[in-house]
Image (cartoon, grey):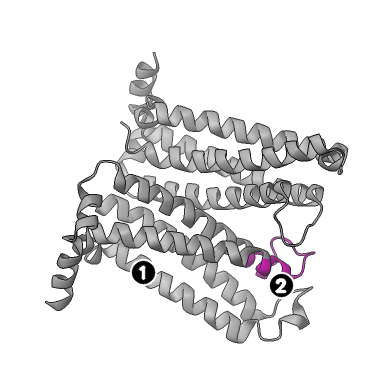
Amino acid sequence: MGIENALRWLQNLQFPTNIRESSWLFPTIETIHVFALVLVVGSILTVDLRLLGFANRDRPFSHIAEEMLPLTWTAFAVAVTAGLLMFSSKALIYYNDVPFRIKMTCLVLAGLNMLGFHRIGARHVTKWDAGKPPAAARLAGAASVLLWAIIVGAGRWIGFTT
Amino acid sequence: MIEEFCDWLSATSISVAFQSAGWFVPIIQTIHIIAISIFLISVYLISFRLIGLTRFRSPVAMITARSAPWIWGALSVLLATGVLLTVTEPARELLNWVFRAKMVLVLLLAGLLLVVQRSLSGNPLYWDESPARQLAARSAGIAALMIGAGIVTAGRWIAYVQ
């Protein structure tokens, strides 16, 4: 099968092999991944909590979003890089791992949710910026909380199955 | 002595019940990680404000007061989930020097946050009043970020140092 051969080729490259065979390289990359993901989840949850009206109700939504956005993207870039490195070290195993697949699916869904929010929910943001967001925006916030909770859980579960 | 306590604890019916439920540790760890996200984002916001790097320059007293319920709420959840995890696997935590180092770091960070909070509730301009205080504020912000990173690192390395 094409994909399995490609993944086998990937994990047999020099650096992925080094990661897999080293006693400290994988844990170090994983630690960076965990630190980055904690900031991704925290910054996204901060925005979601504002959308749902649980926090920072007296501050404009756009302020919260602008404050968190650079952190979310930077931390996400670091998390993805570390994730790709870890994936490359045991590509076939992760590819076939159920919680890994759940995590990747939910990451895509979370991304689509964010896109949908920017296109639809946030379209007239200046109208509700200082107050209560409309239903579409609140729904996106709730979906985001749920998806990221699953992503964290699935991510932790990978550690128990691989 | 601690070893005997661990032996006793891991033999209690509640510990045995937690140990037998395969899903228990992963789910409690997931809640633990989400609580870390909330906690660390709050620490990040206060630290960046103390260092002077924030976009909106809200008064540091306001940021600290606003973050307080989230910080102490998240810490309570972290303590509760941490206790549950330790009850389930006492030796994994209590006999591990990395875990003990993590606890020291947690106490240090909590203490630092408490000092910052207390000083500002008495005088919102406390850290602005002199160049020495401003330098101290910057140092406190940097220290908080580094200790936070240390806590996350130690948390992950408990599993690798047995």
Mark 2 vs mark 1: in front: 2
Q: Nearer the viewer, residue A60 or A2?
A: A2
Q: Residues within 10 Å of mark 2 (few under 14, many from 20)?
A: some
- Label 2 to label 1: alpha-carbon separation: 29 Å
Report the quarter where the N terminus of chain A lies.
Answer: bottom left
Residue B92 visible in rendering:
yes
Q: Position of residue A140 (x, y in %)?
A: 57, 76
Q: Nearer the viewer, residue A128 or B40?
A: B40
Q: Quadrant of the rendered structure where residue B139 is?
A: top right
Based on the picture, tell me whether residue A51 belongs to the magenta stretch.
Answer: yes
Q: Residue furthest top?
A: B1
Position of B78 relative to A92 (above/below): above
Q: Which mark is residue A104?
A: 1
Q: Nearer the viewer, residue B100 or B25?
A: B100
Q: Amino acid at mark 1?
A: Met
Which range is magenta?
A47-66
Please report contact status of discs 2 and 1: CB closer than 8 Å, yes or no. no
Is B133 placed left or right of B16 in the picture? right
Circle 1 chain: A
Q: Are marks 2 and 1 on the same chain?
A: yes
Q: Which residue is mark 2?
A: A62
Position of B107 relative to A80 (above/below): above
Q: Position of residue B124 (x, y in %)?
A: 86, 43
| Residue in view at x 37 percent, y 24 percent | B95
Is A85 placed left or right of A141 in the picture? left
| Residue in view at x 78 percent, y 40 percent | B134
